[in-house]
Image: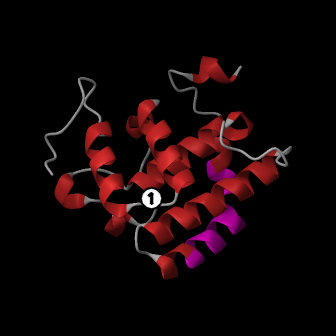
Amino acid sequence: MSAELKTYDGDHAHLIGEILDEVKPRKIVHKVITAAYAAGYEKHSDGITLMPQLAFASLKIKHPAGVGHDWLYYMGLSNPFLPSWVKTEWQARLWCDNWFSDALKDFGHPIRARIWWFGLRIGAWRGWQMHRDANHPFTWRLR
């Protein structure tokens, strides 16, 4: 794999596809990460906040699980992957944080997944609000 595998917009969607083929995450993890890159959210994400050691530094890319989680936070209740039982922002954030934990486990970080899930549940409401208020170029789709 090469960091030179970028689309015309300069994102890493093709490279991420190759990584997902190698990692073989559960279906929902694959779908969310693919959707986040298809939406162009990589440029708006910081990857995994406070855990830069999990970034794919040699490939010069952010961790795909972080990009997917940031996109889910941005989408909020408009997230197309939410189950039908999710009706509130609190439930949506819980689902997103559970998704992130599953994604980290799939990428080989089971201990960090549990610790990070706990941290998200305590303080990520702030990140949720920041992503919801971001006014990114495709915000119009959520209105």
Q: Is residue 40 visible?
A: no
From this view, report whether residue 101 is shown above or below residue 3. Answer: below
Residue 10 horizontal side relative to residue 112, left or right: left
Front-lying residue, 136 or 13: 13
Q: Which residue is drawn at 45% across and 48% down?
A: 67
Q: Quadrant of the C terminus?
A: top right
Label 1: which residue? 48
**What is the x, y in percent for residue 64?**
40, 52
- The residue most toward the bottom is 111
Is residue 39 depicted above or below 63 in this figure? above
Pick the front one: 134 or 107: 107
Q: From the top left corner, tell me how far across and down residue 29 is, in percent.
A: 52, 54
Residue beneath the point at 35% across and 67% down: 54
Residue 122 figure quarter: bottom right
Q: Where is residue 133 in the image (x, y as percent from the top left)?
A: 64, 33
Q: Does the magenta portion include 32?
A: no
Task: Find residue 15 and report its image quarter.
Answer: top left
Residue 118 magenta-highlighted: yes
Residue 58, quarter of picture: bottom left
- Identity of the residue drawn at 46% across and 67% down: 106
Q: What element carries label 1?
A: loop
> In the rendered image of this protein, does residue 58 appear above or below residue 46?
below
Q: Please provide the residue range marked out in magenta.
A: 114-127
Q: Is residue 56 left or right of residue 113?
A: left
Q: Residue at x 85, y 45 (%)?
A: 88
**Count of number-bearing discs:** 1
Depth check: give the residue in front, 6 or 54: 6
Q: Is residue 118 visible?
A: yes
Give the dominant element type of the magenta stretch: helix, strand or loop. Answer: helix
Identity, as a three-letter code, of the amino acid under mark 1: Ile
